[in-house]
Amino acid sequence: MNVSDIREKFLAYFESQGATRVPSSSLVPGNDPTLLFTNSGMVQFKDVFLGQDQRPYKRATTAQRCVRAGGKHNDLENVGYTARHHTFFEMLGNFSFGDYFKREAIRYAWELLTRVYKLPAEKLWVTVYAEDDEAHDIWAKEVGVPVERIIRIGDNKGARYASDNFWQMADTGPCGPCSEIFYDHGPEVWGGPPGSPEEDGDRYIEIWNLVFMQFERYAAGEERFDTEDQAKARKAQVEAEGGIGLVSKDGAAYKLAIFRQKPLPKPCVDTGMGLERIAAVLQHVHSNYEIDLFQALIKAAARETATADLGHASLKVIADHIRACAFLIVDGVIPGNEGRGFVLRRIVRRAIRHGYKLGVRQPFFYRLVPDLAEQMGAAYPELAEARNRVADVLQAEEGRFFETIEHGMGMLDAELAALRAAGGNLLPGELAFKLHDTFGFPLDLTQDVCREHGMKVDEEAFDAAMARQREQARAAGKFKMQAALDYVGDKTRFDGYEHLLVKEARVVALYKDGT
Ligand code: ATP
Ligand code: MG
Ligand code: MG
Ligand code: MG
């Protein structure tokens, strides 16, 4: 089964269960200025889940294009290092808006995996939220999964990829337990089942997340305490009663924000399965990069970079990045120095750097667009249509970076060699800043190179150099804060995202100075 067949089987299966097939929405979320990119299937239905929008259907199914390269979900640093992460991927989903719930969602998932895709049941593991006895019993008693392969996962244990199995849209709003399905790729691959100390490995790969939106979480007050211990004691009390307490510092005092939850009158379902991950399973390969679609892109990248070793990690990165870059451009993003455009620019430059590493000295990345259109143009006519524009935008962006990359890489390589000779492992932040400022090396690109050499960038010093330049610009009276403020102005409701906005806004400000 190739990727197209797998996608089609998923959508057709849920259609046969009464779902409406809804097209993928844009990577630029139309309904949420606080979200950088569409990063899951539920984004286009957010307002429906919140009860603020109505659709003529109660069941939907989609293959949603997603990007996780910034914001709360950022998998950019995983690309090329894990078998399962991409910056761009397709999420297959089925959704119930107050219609079917937990029991049916679990049964549908199981039937699709074991009867339609014909996966061996004994290779599948499932997780449920620690307190969700209902889901546990459906899996154990109704579906018949042996209890040894049903794992209860509690709140975040702090492990790198640990999921807390409790989903929430934001601090308040719909939320509920998740149940995830994992596939065991076998003992040849290192890793342990979810919840085990070896879960960071790639043996048990998460393929499908079922979210049961069951509760509505609401703010139920704030209390202040003189000491952290007092706040924590009260938090424990609140949580013993079924509430949630978040402690934060508030001047000299400690604040406890209290949330409580009540059952949603009409529970909903939101699920997401990574198309590339299920394709790897169905094509009997371990890594997503071995599936038909990626092999075609990797071959194209090898052709354009004249690389003989098809297993070279840089080819994987380039194959990953062409998808993200092309689809972002299809959806109207153009490389720039702020917000979404800056993320796109960073991804393009990372791809070019990998091409450079393979010996390429002139624009090559844009030449992969026809190959991508061949692979994905049928499923995404908007890509087929925009292919020439996409190639033009990429070629122009590449031309600019190829003008400076040689000097920048020369400087960086020399510094890394000197560092190694001296036994150091911390690249001076001033140098990273110079690379950024003079040669257009985004910090994450320099960090990516350093990581390959087992080194790190002195980020504090980088930030300080950046701040100094900003000061100078401000002193010179050329500093235009408005663009930055516009960007930070939207009060975000997504955890962790605000931080990103602020960080990028600072970069925006620098570029506004004309440098
Ligand atoms: P992981 O723990 O492997 O990072 P996740 O828990 O972050 O995955 P979810 O947010 O639950 O992923 O997304 C639903 C599904 O989307 C996952 O089960 C997986 O199949 C797929 N998926 C998530 N992130 C990626 C990615 N970066 N590349 C490819 N597929 C992904
Ligand atoms: Mg993840
Ligand atoms: Mg996970
Ligand atoms: Mg998950």
Image (cartoon, rainbow, N blue to C red):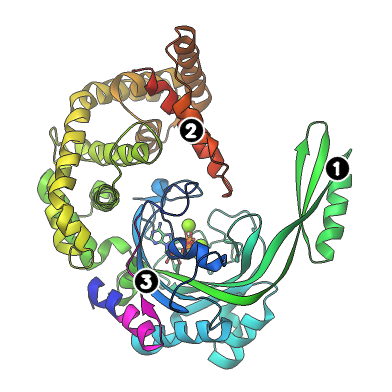
What residue span does the magenta drawing correspond to? 9-26
Dot 3: what SS? strand
Q: Earlier in the sequence, mark 1 or mark 2?
A: 1
**Residue 134 seen from this side:** yes
Question: Looking at the picture, how far across and down is residue 149, in whole percent?
Answer: 56, 80
Question: Looking at the picture, how far across and down is residue 121, in whole percent?
Answer: 44, 86
Q: Residue at x 44, y 12 (%)?
A: 473
Query: Which residue is label 3 attached to?
Result: 62
Query: Which residue is label 2 attached to?
Result: 486
Disc 1 within 8 angstroms of ligand 1 (CB): no
Which of label 3 and label 2 is nearer to you?
Answer: 2
- At label 3, the amino acid type is Thr
Look at the picture and state if 215 lies above or below 480.
below
Look at the picture and state if 456 lies above or below 22.
above
Q: Quadrant of the N terminus?
A: bottom left
Residue 15 is a magenta residue: yes
The image quadrant that residue 188 belongs to is: bottom left
Q: Residue at x 46, y 85 (%)?
A: 108
